[in-house]
Image (cartoon, grey):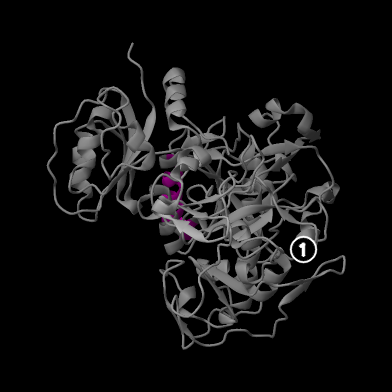
Amino acid sequence: MRTRYFVTLVFVLFASGLGGSKAAEPRHAKPDRPSHAKLDRYLQEVDGRVPDDAPVRVIVTARKGASEKVKSAVAGSGAIVHEHKSIDAVTAEVPAGRLRSLAEREDVLAVSLDAPVHAGADNVGSVAENTLLATLGLREKTDVGHEVVVAVLDSGIVNNGQLPIVGFYDFVNNGGDKVKQYDDYGHGTHVAGMIKNKDDKADGRYRSVAHGSKVLGMKVLAGDGSGYTSTVIDAIEFAIANKEKLKIAVINLSLGHPIYEPAATDPLVQAVERAVDAGIVVVVAAGNEGMNRETGEVGYAGITSPGNAPSAITVGAVDTKNTVTRSDDVVAPFSSRGPTWYDGYAKPDVVAPGRRIMSFMAQDSNLCRRYPESCATADTRAYMALSGTSMAAAVATGVVADIIDASRHASGGQSPSPNLVKAILEFTAVTLPNVDVLSQGAGSINAAGAIALADSIDTREDTLSPWLQVGVTPSTTLSNGETLDWAQHIVWGDHIVWGDYVYSNEPAWALHVVWGNHIVWGDHVVWGNTFDSVVWGTTQVWGTHVVWGNAVLAYDANGTLLYGDQIDWGNVSADHVVWGSLDSTLSALSASNSLWSPVF
C-alpha cells in the first residue's frame, strides 16, 4: 500500500490567460533545487520531497475571468473538494507530481498550503471566582438591546440551558447543513459561553460579556480541535451569503495556522477581508506562539493566520491576575506578538483577558475527558478555565457585540462599519506601561469606555462631519475607584495616529476601505506622510533578532539597527525559531500518515 501524504495546498490564481504546463520534474529529485516562487514557504520545502503520486490536498484561487479555466485544469489533475467563489478558489486533492506544473501556469498566482487550523487554547486551569466583568468595567447585567448575532466558527456549541443558540451549521460532518447542536471537542462551547449566556443568577461567577447578543454556531473543527483552512473558508462564505437572512454582525475565529505567505495570497486572510468588506466584523485570535516553550523567552513574529488579515481585529492575551485592578495586568507570555510574517503588519490590534478565563464546557467533550480534574460540573452544566488568545478573542468578540448594540441605539438601528468598531476598540483601550506596540497593539480593551463612546456617536451624520452627539470624557472609572485613561490612538497598518479623528465621520470608517491603506483624513493629514511610523523598539525573537517578513532585522550592542548582509545569519534561523524544524515535521508526517497540526 502506498503512503498517502496528507499535505494541504492552496493554489492562488490571478494572472489572466491559460498558461502552458511543463512536464513535472521528479518529486524525489534533489531537495535543494530552486523552488517555484508561487509555492508558499511550507510547500517550497515539501516540493521534491514526496513521491510524484502522493495525493496532496490543495486550494486553487483564480483571477477574475480565469476561474473556470483553472478549475478545469485542476479537475484534470485530481478531485475537486470545495469551491470558494468569494476568493475565486477551489480546493482539490492532486498528485504531488503536479504541484510545480500547476504553479507554473500563467493563470496561477501562488500555491499555498490548505493548512490545518487548530483551536487556540494554551492550557487549562482550576475553577475559580472570576473578575472578568469588573475588570472590563461592565456590570453583571446590562440592558438587552438589538441582539447582535455573533457567528462562532469553532468545534461546535452545546446548549446546556444557558447558551441561547439561534442556529447551528455543521461544516465538518454534514456539509454545512443545519443540524442539532453538538461539540465533541468543547472549545467552541467555552468560546460561546464567554460571549453570551442567559445570566442565571445561580451562576454569578460565569457572567458573559455581551448580554445583548445571540450566538450562531458553525462547526469547522473536528473532535480533536483541528480542521482544514478550506472548511473555515466555506463557513465564512456561508456567513457572507446569509448575512442579511441570519442577521450576522460578527464572526469569531478563535483558531489559526502558521503564516506561510503574504496576506495578499493567503486564502484564509482573503476570505476574512471579503467578510469585512461585506460589513461583518471579524475578530481573530493572535495565536499562542509568543514564548519559547523550552527556554521561557518571549519572542516576536508569532502571529498566526488569519491574524495577519489587515481588516480583522486581531487579539492578544492579557493576564489580569484575576483582579479588578489594571495595575497588575501583563501581556501573557504565550500571546503571539508582531510583526506579521512577510508583510510586517503591526499586530495584534488589541489585547484582552485571556488567562484562566471561566466559561461553560460541553460535558461529553474531549477536553472534559482529557482534563477531568479541571472540568467542574453542576447539574446539567460543566465549566472549565482555559487560557489562550482564543479566550481573549472571545472576550473581545463580546465587547464588539456590545459596541455594535450601543452604536445601533445611538444611530436609529444603523450598524457601525467594521472599521469604526475597530477604531472605537483601539481608541478607548488602556495602554499597558512599558509594553511595546507589537505586544499589545493599541492596548488592553476597555469595554465600558468603548460602549460609552459608541453610544455617543450617530453614524448617520455626513462624511467629514462631527458625529459625537454628547461629550465624552476619555477615561473610565472601574468599580474599585480606579480611573483608566483611554489610549486615544489608533494603530493603522504600520502607523500610529494620535488625536480625535474617531470623533468625526472620516472616510476611513466607510465600507470597502482596507485597514492599513494610506488614506486622506479629511483636511487633517495625508496618511503616512506626517505621522511617525510605529516605533518597534528593540523587539526581538528569542534574544537579539526580529523576524520581519521574509527578512530579519537585528540590533548590535550599541542599539544600532542592522539589516540584511550586516546580520550574522549564523545566529538566526527564522523557520526554526518560530515554527520548528520543517524536516522533522515532514518526517513525523510521513511516519504518522496524518495531518500536521501545530499546537498553539
Q: Is residue 254 left or right of residue 245?
A: right
Q: Where are the magenta residues, as a range? A: 231-245
Element carrying mark 1: loop
Q: Residues within 10 Å of mark 1 (few under 14, many from 20)?
A: many
Q: Residue at x 68, y 29 (%)?
A: 364
Q: Is residue 104 left or right of residue 407?
A: left
Q: Residue at x 67, y 42 (%)?
A: 190
Question: Which quadrant: the N terminus?
Answer: top left
Locate residue 99, reporting x and y percent: 26, 34
Give the residue at the far right of this rendering: 480
As shown in the figure, which amino acid type bears the numbered disc 1?
A: Leu
Locate residue 250, reporting x and y percent: 55, 58
Q: Residue at x 23, y 47 (%)?
A: 108
Q: Is residue 108 left or right of residue 518?
A: left
Q: Nearer the viewer, residue 568 or 372?
A: 568
Locate residue 424, reporting x and y percent: 61, 71
Locate residue 441, reporting x and y percent: 60, 62
Would you name the residue on which mark 1 appears? 138
Question: Which quadrant: the C terminus?
Answer: top right
The answer to which quarter of the image holds residue 91 is top left
